[in-house]
Amino acid sequence: MSLSHLSIAGRIYCAFAALIALLAMLVVVAWLGVQTLSGTFSFYRGVAAQADEIGVLVDQLGRTRLAFSRYQVTPTAEAGAGVVARLADLSTANAAVSGLTPLGEQLADYSAQVGQMIALDQDVLTQTTQMQQSGDAATAQLASMIANASQSANLNAKAAAISGLAMQQLLQTRLAAGQLAATDAGQFAAAQDLAQQTLATLTELRSIFFKTEDVAQVDGVAAQVAPFAQTMVGVHQSLTQRQSLGQTVAAIDAELAAAYDGQLADARQAQQTLGAAGEAQSGRPA
């Protein structure tokens, strides 16, 4: 039906109806725009929060590295407890960030490896203390035997010479043992060779003496040198194992750092993208 056939009132009603329909369309379009903009900024807030959380993880990893470096310089029980505490905080924070749960396994491995290193360091400390005690006792007994022999009326020149050689070898053995390093197999072999030379010299010295007390003195020295040499083997094994653990820890640390840096970079890129989209949707210049 043509509008010309409508009354004036009908025409007015039609005009108002068209206007209302147009306004309704504008409201719907505006509502959809607001919803889209709201969703964009909601995502933006979520990504921004995640970026902040990952930034905290990066900071905590740095603090953990610093604590571990301090422990490496001074491997005390207190410093070790500090590393363990930092790792526990890092693991808890990591578990709270969505999308980073898989890294929890690496953090657990990190903590386990560090725990083994701390335990090994305590073993090395115990073993080196035992070596120090055995070395001190052997040196003191051999020095006493040499002093007594030099004051004896029946000075045995050969025994005196061999005793001096044994003392020289013992001191060289202790010096070499004190410089053991896991990365130097040749140094360990040299220290072991010196220990065996010392024991061989003591055996030769024992064959010269006939008096029971003299033989007992030599046996006393040998009884200290033998466990010294055996403990040295344990120290070297512990140091070698610790070096291997250190390499594993370094690899895990590098993987975690790369993962966190990558996640942080992705979150910041998403922030920029969503921010630009929100500004475009709101009509503001980017």
Image (tube, rainbow, N blue to C red):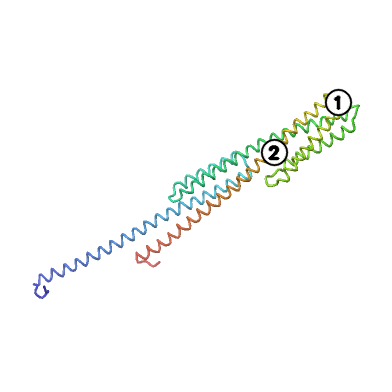
Q: How many marks on residues?
A: 2
- Residue 14's place in the image compared with 125, above or below, is below
Q: Quadrant of the N terminus?
A: bottom left
Q: Which mark is residue 150?
A: none
Determine the CA span between mark 2 and mark 1: 33 Å
Towards the viewer: 88 or 164: 164
Q: Amino acid at mark 1?
A: Phe
Q: Earlier in the sequence, mark 2 or mark 1?
A: 1
In the image, is 120 to the left or to the right of 98? right
What residue sits 49% from the left and 56% below the top? Answer: 262
The quarter holding residue 209 reads: top right
Percent coordinates x, y for residue 256 in the rendering: 52, 51
Q: Quadrant of the C terminus?
A: bottom left
Percent coordinates x, y for residue 136 in the rendering: 75, 33
From the image, tell me which residue sits under label 2. 233
Label 2: state its secondary structure.
Answer: helix
What residue sits 37% from the left and 58% below the top? Answer: 41
Q: Are marks 2 and 1 in contact (CB under 8 Å)?
A: no
Q: Residue furthest top?
A: 212
Q: Amino acid at mark 2?
A: Val
The quarter holding residue 221 reads: top right
In the image, is 73 to the left or to the right of 262? right
Percent coordinates x, y for residue 83 in the rendering: 56, 43
Q: Label 1 neighbourhood size at 10 Å, few (<14), some (14-19), many (20+)?
A: few
Percent coordinates x, y for residue 282 in the rendering: 34, 64
What residue sits 38% from the left and 64% below the top? Answer: 279
Label 1: state its secondary structure.
Answer: loop
From the image, tell me which residue sits under label 1. 210
- Residue 226's place in the image compared with 100, above or below, is above
Q: Label 2 neighbourhood size at 10 Å, few (<14), some (14-19), many (20+)?
A: some
